Amino acid sequence: MKIKFVDRPDVHLWWPHAHKFLKMGLETSENEVTLEQLYELINSGHTQLIMYFNDDLEVAGAMTCNFISLPNMRVLHVSALSGYRVIDQRSLWNEFKNECVKHGVHSIRAACKPAQARLWRRFGFNTIYQQIEVKLTGR
């Protein structure tokens, strides 16, 4: 598998392939963002679109993430991920980590459900915080 960090001017070319995967990825979220809002965040440069390809160079998945600059590190926060066999491809994750280093990233993080966290642990992810929430509106 191969990955591609999509340049902002090319988002419209990849969105027809990405949106079906990202729609599936957002199904396990807490409704923080709609698919349409995610598209706008990508187009505005606030969110990075990453595409995955199988060995035949067919689209196999998509991911969105945000770069977070902290005083002591640059973090890549995965906000959505879905695809065919994306989570079990060790070589893909090694390539992804290498690309992240090229983008100045020191750490990759994600907020996810416990079952998803167990899958991510296969690739070296560890629980560093527990994310909690209190809703303040009726939304």
Image (cartoon, rainbow, N blue to C red):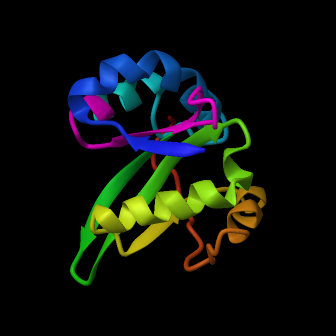
Q: Within the image, what quadrant is residue 124 found in?
A: bottom right
- Residue 90 visible within the image: yes
Judge by depth and name the residue closer to the eye, 111 or 9. Answer: 9
Range of residues picked out in magenta: 42-61
Residue displayed at 59% across by 26% down: 58
Q: Is residue 84 left or right of residue 98?
A: right
Residue displayed at 62% across by 38% down: 82
Residue displayed at 30% across by 34% down: 41
Judge by depth and name the residue closer to the eye, 137 or 110. Answer: 110
Count of all numbered marks drawn on residues in the image: 0
Q: Quadrant of the N terminus?
A: top right
Q: Position of residue 52 (x, y in %)?
A: 54, 39
Question: Is residue 5 depicted above or below 88 in this figure?
Answer: above
Q: In the displayed image of the protein, which residue is found farthest to the bottom?
A: 72
Q: Position of residue 111 (x, y in %)?
A: 56, 59
Q: Position of residue 88 (x, y in %)?
A: 74, 54
Question: Is residue 61 depicted above or below 94 in this figure?
Answer: above
Judge by depth and name the residue closer to the eye, 131 or 79. Answer: 79
Q: Within the image, what quadrant is residue 122 found in?
A: bottom right
Residue displayed at 72% across by 56% down: 116
User: Does 108 appear in magenta?
Assistant: no
Q: Position of residue 67 (x, y in %)?
A: 31, 58
- Residue 76 visible within the image: no
Question: Is residue 42 depicted above or below 11 in this figure?
Answer: below
Q: In the displayed image of the protein, which residue is found farthest to the front?
A: 56
